[in-house]
């Protein structure tokens, strides 16, 4: 706050397509998709109309002991688009909770299986992982800046390395990186027989870590390990879901079906808070029993599966078809990558680039050739982003990494404006 109050606050008054407008009448390209949620652009009349129509039917009714029409329809649609085998949908209202639900489900499933070896109380997660801000999700996190202070409050986590791969700077091949990291994961599995409930992972990209990209092949290898040791695989697709990586869900790239999958962010096209945790028949069946057995999954929020959110989500999925989002995004991704390649070649100010789909993290350097980097107190990420604002672009950095998350509805012209402006600011600032 001490830093924030020194700057002129950005107060948004309205939006249109990929642009936000502030109260002073300035226009900004929404280069972080309003914190990684926006897919089809702002104020799409199809989504707005669906919300208004639902508003006239019912704004909210509970999912505890009843359901409602948009929740039923959306669950059907989600199962249709989800990786095969994910057949059950548990609603909530934000990404942290969708993950939290997943880990509670995994724990309770094993507890109700009454294993002779006792409860499975351990979770495996990754260095630099981010899974949300509730205490359970923080317990899976591996970013000390966000998570360190809460250490004494957290669940027992076994940390393994994320197979970070950059086509620009990695010296090892993706296969070598994936293989090395899988070995460490397997060693961890072996060291704690019958004690691990689940492994939780962000597929393909660690978002909040600075868009670190995963070595191809890793996810498939992890699925095989989870099968071999009968440990649940929980995928956090909160960020990667809904087309971000160029497929509907990131795990499709490796034809992997997790046991549990958390989704949120893009689910409503970025219009309203909604989340879901999808799971398999096996996990679902683990919660069936006679009334007095209390095998119920006791987790329900007041606004779980809100009808307005579900209506927005249905309209958003319709737009995926109408706009052919997953087809039209492919040339944009290819063009985006070409521009990033060029930026890396051209600018000594770029230490590394992490790219996947319509996502990039650009690590800044004073000089890549001389291997000189900015100190955190130099606030170079912030400075570049403030300069970008004067070029009608709104980005939010993570430290000295620029975070590019264009709305999927962006055009080639928008991508040019974004990268051209970054090129100019990299030369002009600092
Ligand atoms: C944003 C995010 C979350 C948390 O979602 P919220 O809706 O902000 O609670 C969890 N996991 C990942 C990978 C995310 O990017």
Image (cartoon, grey):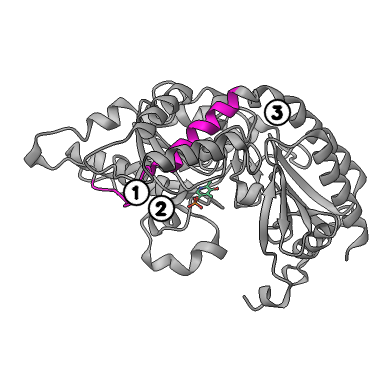
Q: Quadrant of residue 199?
A: top left
In this figure, which residue is indicated by the disc labeled 1? 122
Query: Which residue corresponds to the image point at 84% horizontal and 60% vertical from the top-left?
Result: 390
- Is residue 157 placed above or below 109 in the rendered structure? below
Estimate the x, y position of residue 241 in percent, counting from the top left.
54, 36
Vertical order, 283 against 375 (above or below): above
Query: Are the residues tagged 2 and 1 within 8 Å (C-beta)?
Result: yes
Give the residue number, with chain letter if any, for mark 3.
329
For residue 179, which numbered disc appears in the image? none
Q: Report crowding for label 1: few under 14, some 14 to 19, many 20 or more residues within 10 A (C-alpha).
A: some
Q: On the rendered structure, is 413 left or right of 149?
A: right
Residue identifier under label 2:
157
Helix, strand or loop status at disc 3: helix
Tell me the mark number nearer the camera, choosing from 3 and 1: 3
Quote the CA–CA distance across marks 3 and 1.
Answer: 39 Å
What is the spatial separation of the Cα atoms under label 2 and label 3, in whole angstroms?
37 Å
2 or 3: tag closer to the N-terminus: 2
Earlier in the chain: of badge 3 and badge 1, it is: 1
Secondary structure under tag 1 reads: strand
């Amino acid at each position: 706050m001490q830093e924030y109050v020194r700057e002129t606050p950005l107060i948004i008054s309205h939006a249109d397509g990929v642009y936000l407008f502030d109260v002073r009448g300035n226009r900004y390209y929404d280069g972080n998709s309003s914190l990684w949620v926006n897919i089809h652009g702002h104020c799409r009349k199809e989504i707005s109309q669906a919300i208004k129509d639902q508003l006239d039917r019912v704004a909210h009714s509970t999912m505890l002991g009843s359901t409602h029409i948009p929740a039923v329809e959306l669950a059907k649609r989600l199962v249709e688009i989800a990786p095969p085998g994910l057949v059950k949908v548990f609603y909530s209202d934000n990404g942290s909770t969708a993950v939290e639900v997943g880990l509670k489900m995994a724990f309770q499933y094993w507890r109700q299986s009454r294993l002779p070896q006792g409860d499975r109380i351990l979770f495996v997660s990754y260095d630099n992982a981010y899974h949300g801000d509730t205490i359970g999700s923080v317990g899976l996190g591996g970013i000390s800046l966000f998570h360190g202070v809460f250490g004494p409050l957290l669940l027992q986590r076994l940390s393994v390395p994320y197979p970070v791969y950059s086509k620009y700077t990695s010296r090892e091949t993706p296969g070598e990186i994936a293989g090395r990291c899988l070995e460490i994961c397997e060693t961890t599995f072996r060291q704690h027989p019958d004690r691990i409930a689940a492994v939780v992972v962000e597929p393909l990209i660690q978002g909040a870590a600075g868009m670190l990209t995963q070595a191809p092949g890793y996810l498939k290898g992890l699925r095989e390990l989870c099968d071999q040791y009968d440990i649940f695989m929980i995928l956090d697709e909160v960020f990667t879901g809904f087309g971000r990586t160029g497929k509907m869900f990131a795990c499709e790239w490796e034809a992997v079906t997790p046991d549990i999958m958390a989704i949120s962010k893009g689910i409503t096209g970025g219009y309203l808070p909604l989340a879901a945790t999808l799971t398999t028949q096996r996990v679902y069946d683990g919660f069936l029993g006679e009334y007095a057995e209390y095998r119920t999954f006791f987790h329900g929020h007041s606004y779980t599966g809100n009808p307005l959110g579900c209506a927005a989500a249905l309209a958003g999925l319709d737009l995926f078809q109408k706009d052919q989002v997953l087809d039209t995004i492919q040339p944009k991704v290819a063009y985006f990558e070409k521009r990033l390649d060029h930026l890396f070649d051209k600018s000594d100010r770029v230490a590394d680039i992490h790219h996947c789909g319509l996502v990039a993290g650009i690590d800044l350097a004073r000089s890549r050739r001389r291997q000189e980097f900015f100190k955190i107190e130099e606030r170079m990420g912030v400075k570049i982003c403030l300069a970008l604002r004067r070029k009608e672009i709104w980005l939010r950095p993570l430290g000295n990494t620029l975070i590019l998350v264009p709305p999927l509805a962006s055009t080639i012209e928008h991508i040019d404006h974004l990268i051209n402006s970054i090129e100019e600011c990299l030369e002009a600032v600092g």
